[in-house]
Image (cartoon, helix red, strand yellow):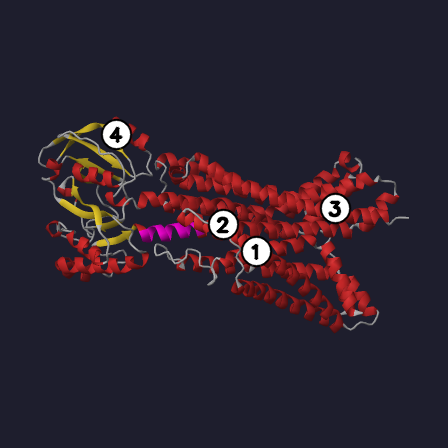
Amino acid sequence: MYAKLLGNNIKKALEDYVVYFFTLVISSTLFFAFLSLTSRYNDILGGDGNYSLTLFQNTIRYAVLAISIIFVVLIRYINTYMLRQRSREFSVYMILGMEQRTIAGQFFSETFVFGIVAVLAGCILGTALSGMMTAFVLRTTTGFGAFRLGFYPDTVILTLLFFGTAFLFVGAWNSRRIYKIKLIDLLNEKKANEGQRKKKGSYLFSLVIALVCFGVCGVVLYNFSHMNGIYAGNIPEEISNRYQTVTIVAAIAGIFALYNALAFVITVIRKRRKWKNRNINSVLLGNLFQKVSSTARILSISTLAITISLVAFVILPMLAEITMGYLDYRMPYDIMIYNTYMYIDEMDDIPEIDFSFIGNILQGHGVTVSEEVSQKSYFVWERDFNTVDTREYWRDLPRLAMRISEYNAMRRMAGFEPVALADNGFFMHLDYEMDMESTAESIGTGTRILQLDDGTLLTLADTAVYNEPLGQYLFNSGGSVLVFPDAVCDNLHLARTCYYANTETVIPYNLCDSIREEISAAFQSRYEYLFERYETKYDTDRRYSSFINPIRFRTQENNDTVLTATSVRLLGIYSGIIFFIICMTVLALHGVADSIDHRMQYRTLHQMGVDRDDIVRMASRQSLYYFFTPCVIAFMIALLLIYSFVVRYGHKVFTYIGSAGFQFGVMIPGLLILLILVCYYGATIYTIRRNLNRTLNSIR
């Protein structure tokens, strides 16, 4: 008998909670597919020596597990919700003589079997999605990749273990609750908060708070956007953090005040005579007031979670695209070694570094240098030299100058044509991220003559500014460097020497760290006096770094950047989908529950002569308002937050992605969100109308 009851209840649960079942299937599918990328059986790159998956797999594994903890919250919320909906049914079982231990066991078995079936279906679907994701990672890293089914035993076990543990934990909690609850409490379990009217002042206070908070968001973003003109598109980090923090805090406070304010607006509308006497609008407004006032916290949390999902959908993949574009700018050469004089106190101690030893180190590892340049930078005026003690700010470093011959050598190595420069001319090379047009315009309005310490006069070239991506190491401060004729640089004092090289073969990833250590050791043995004089003095400075640091290799940078960008993009999609479908599930189940709880209301209205179509239309409108209001509000707030992101990183977005890429990056997540929204709302309205038709058809 109990087995038959169990089967019937599971079948009924699949009908009434199909949205929850669908959510569990999607969630377990995504969980399986993402974790499959970290499986020890999934050799994604086939042992390619140019890549190391350790960082990528650890990032995916721990981030997915951390994000997925929210499933426990969802499962507990839905199971508690199911218990409340069936409380009167369980009361009947108790009255008929069924032991509470048996009722608790039945409910635990139903929810556990219900969940495990969904997870097993998710694992099956996850094998296909895993193949697609593996192909995506391969195409992102190596440029090619073929689809293959991804069924991995360790991933199956981990998926079943994670969700099974959640079902056991939540099921045991609810079973204990059923076992100890009294009959009278169980009978009253389903009595919902009917949205008791608060004092008018409370509603007005919420309305004022909501208006003030969203007003603050608008004012702050308006002022923030005008900072771009002040800082030429490169707003300092501390200013951006301040403006964005105020915007986010004000938006969150506004969300939590908004729904009480909406309840107040509904009460005002209900008092208007034309709404009271128009069809059954009074019933609709009463239901909406009850629902909004009794679930204001749920609506607020759902709106916040949807906002997070929308922002994650757009911003995280955008950051990944920026990172990928930034890679070409950051590493135009196979090897880059940066040299600094920041922790040298005497100008005469600055060494003219001979980097010839690097070729020997590379040769010892079977790597041959095909082209190289030791790029020297010079003080334009000797008074520009400053020390740790004389700098007002630790990054208070002057703009330097470099030789035209070394500049052209770097251009050729990076794949650009060399440029010409007159014997008495100079020009400026800008950071690739800076606005070249506005800088050239401002230079053109100023003086075009530069006088050096020895009286030499240099004239600004006709083409005053270049900004091809030649790497960050060119710039000492301010994102620019001056380019002088070689003969002029012969009379300037050396500031530093950086090294750039391309190799005939790719440097294997697993050799990069050992080569870096050998280069550092060789430099220290050749220029030991620098370490003897300054390392002991400054090694306690938290910003201190060696005199040649960082030492970067394209292989290592490409691996770390590409795989990090890929993981950020994937996690943005994962977190966005998870947060969104969880909110859709909660909103959908509340809509379905209303169609069940209001059965007596619908019957009464129909018996009073209200047309069936009007009742169906009223229930559909109620579901529409309740379902889409959090989505619309979250969409508007997400637009504000995305706008603040564009204000902060707009110069990077349009430099490394472009306006078309940005629009495409917003459109694709938007379409995916819209598809999920339509599917969930379609399933919800179908279930509501089915329940409503059952109710009305039962009237004799």
Residue 364 in view (yes/no): yes
Q: How far separated are the C-alphas under marks 1 and 3?
A: 40 Å
In this view, the mark in front (4 or 3): 4
Q: Which region shows up in magenta?
A: 555-566
Mark closer to the chain start, 1 or 2: 1
User: Of the numbered discs in the image, which one, if any, rests on residue 443?
Assistant: 4
Residue 271 against residue 541 in the figure, above or below: above
Q: Nearer the viewer, residue 132 or 88?
A: 132
How many C-alpha atoms fall within 10 Å of the one at disc 3: few (<14), some, or many (≥20)? some
Q: Secondary structure at mark 2?
A: helix
The percent coordinates of residue 180 (x first, y second) are: 72, 72
346 left or right of 174 in image? left
Of badges 2 and 3, nearer the viewer stands 2
Q: Is residue 563 magenta?
A: yes
Of pointers 4 and 2, the one earlier in the residue sequence: 4
Q: Earlier in the sequence, mark 4 or mark 3?
A: 3
| Residue type highlighted by circle 1 | Gly
